[in-house]
Image (spheres, helix red, strand yellow):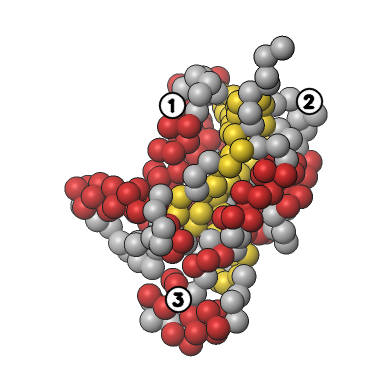
Amino acid sequence: MTGFDTVGAAYTAHSDSARGRLRHDLVERRLRAEFTARPARVLDVGCGNGEMTLRLAAAGHQVTGADPSATMLATSADRLAARPELADRVQLIEADLESLPFDGERFDAVCCHGVLMYLAEPGPAIARLAGLVAPGGLLSILAKNRRSIGVREALTGDYETAHRLIESEADRSLGNLGRETRGDDPGALDRHAAEHGLSPLSWQGVRIFHDHLDDTWIPEPAAYAAALEVEWAASWRSPYRDMGHLVHTLARRPERSRS
Ligand SMILES: C[S@@+](CC[C@H](N)C(=O)[O-])C[C@H]1O[C@@H](n2cnc3c(N)ncnc32)[C@H](O)[C@@H]1O
């Protein structure tokens, strides 16, 4: 039993909201642009309710979703059962980052989205994940952005909390599920990846202009599409990207040099 066994329904409600969907759409768009192997062998660590696992399988990739929460994994399995056409492209396993059963196996992409914020520090996790990336493969990390801690609170009018977080240069704040979560600096994540032989790619800020809206933000399809394009355009560019609630960092393992 992990702390996530009790928040599965709340997480899925948030994940399915327009605000949650923005994040998934932005991350999926970037991943699909960066994949070189088709179909790619993908490992989605901390797959939660299987949103990205199923999206990538639907795009034709072979995806293993791993999560330590039996409840989250059961939600993934239920969602997979509703998509029988994806059954032979998805494998689900109950494991945390520290106990992944893949000695010697390597993947074209290793995703770890929305997990580092629950860990005490990013270094050991990135070391473990980087070791699973095949030559030419990608490491994709979605983390809470330390640079923007306090912005959500300020934009929602909680000035007292925002003031405290900003003045103390806090590295954590209350997350969507009502827990304190830790932020990472994208530059530090890139350095950790580089220490393990990966070459960092451009990082993106995720949910810059829409993070402070709550899950009652239900835009019409055209408004959603326009919002997504604004977020995408800003996600690459400072200073906008520095204000994203999340950061998407990616790094690639160089291909083996030909002898
Ligand atoms: C906020 S959810 C994110 C789910 C999904 N990756 C997404 O982006 O929508 C965090 C997930 O990380 C999992 N998790 C927590 N600690 C973990 C660890 N040490 N290793 C792997 N997964 C972990 C939780 O069980 C939960 O399903």
Q: Front-most of 102 and 81?
A: 102
- Give the side of residue 243 with respect to residue 120, left or right: left
Please provide percent x and percent y for residue 71: 62, 48
Please report contact status of discs 1 and 2: CB closer than 8 Å, yes or no: no
* Disc 3: which residue: 153
Q: Which residue is pictured at 69% across the width and 49% down the height?
A: 192
* Disc 2: which residue: 104
> Which label lies toward us, 1 or 2?
2
Q: Which residue is pictured at 63% across the width and 52% down the height?
A: 189
Q: In which quarter of the image is the C terminus?
A: top right
The residue most toward the front is 259
Please provide percent x and percent y for residue 53: 53, 35
The residue most toward the bottom is 160
Q: Which residue is pictured at 49% across the width and 74% down the height?
A: 150
Please provide percent x and percent y for residue 206: 44, 54
Name the quadrant containing residue 46.
top right
* Disc 1: which residue: 59
What distance separates the C-alpha of mark 3 from that of mark 1? 36 Å
Amino acid of disc 2? Gly
Residue 81 visible in image: yes
* First in sequence: mark 3 vs mark 2: 2
Amino acid of disc 3? Glu
Please report contact status of discs 3 and 1: CB closer than 8 Å, yes or no: no
